[in-house]
Image: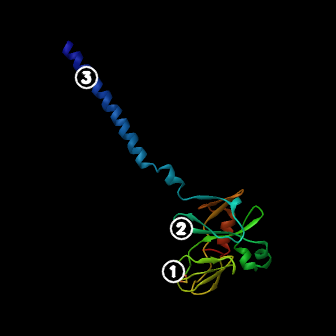
Amino acid sequence: MKENSRRGFMGKAFGAVAGVGAVASLYAMKRSWDPLPSVKAAGFTTLDMSGYEENQLVTEKWRGKPIFVMKKTAEMLAKQTEAQSARDIKVGDDHYMIAIGLCTHLGCIPAYNPDEKGFLCACHGGQFDWAGDVTKTPPPRGFDIPPFKIDGMKLVLGEEGPEYKAMKENGITL
Ligand code: FES
């Protein structure tokens, strides 16, 4: 009788431990199936647009790609053509050139010359203006513009806001 109840107790205790173990391993499995929080957020990069200086190129990063950000000067805005203005990204009162910083020929990273206000790709001599449009081949087109959404004074790279969708529809970016 005593033996039996002891066995009964041991059996229950074992069952309880096994149950806890099963729940724990189910929990661990679920965690490994769910994407980590950092992976969920990995597709987006949020830029605070209040800190950029005019005519200074800053290279940010989004999904491992260089992203060129340059705040345009009043002189650029006064001089630029309609095609150049069409590539502008306006945040607050400021206009920016924001683009994937890879040459559309074979993917080198062009350098910006603030005095000439243009880009030169050292690989095969391709050139781009301050708006990111191509001015000298072999690049077949201007810099591609990454998906973006304007959120107050912030810019979220990786989200397709209405301004980006309009650019895509109008053939300004691929
Ligand atoms: Fe830029 Fe060829 S990769 S010109």
Secondary element at tag 1 = loop
Residue 3 lies, with reference to residue 21, above or below; the image says above
Query: At 51% from the left edge and 52% from the top edge, which residue is drawn?
Result: 38
Residue 9: mark:
none
Residue found farthest to the top: 1
Kindly indicate the quadrant of the structure image that contains residue 161: bottom right
Kindly indicate the quadrant of the structure image that contains residue 81: bottom right
Secondary element at tag 3 = helix
Q: CA distance from mark 3 to mark 2?
A: 60 Å
For label 3, the residue is 10
Front label number (3 vs 2):
2
- Badge 2: few (under 14), some or many (20 or more) residues near its Cα, within 10 Å? few
Front label number (3 vs 1):
1
Q: Amino acid at mark 2?
A: Lys
Query: At 76% from the left edge and 79% from the top edge, which residue is drawn?
Result: 80
For label 1, the residue is 106
Mark 3 or 2 closer to N-term? 3
Residue 96 lies, with reference to residue 44, above or below; the image says below
Q: Amino acid at mark 3?
A: Met
The N terminus, quarter of image:
top left
Nearest the camera: 68 or 84? 68
Mark 1 C-beta closer than 8 Å to ligand 1: yes
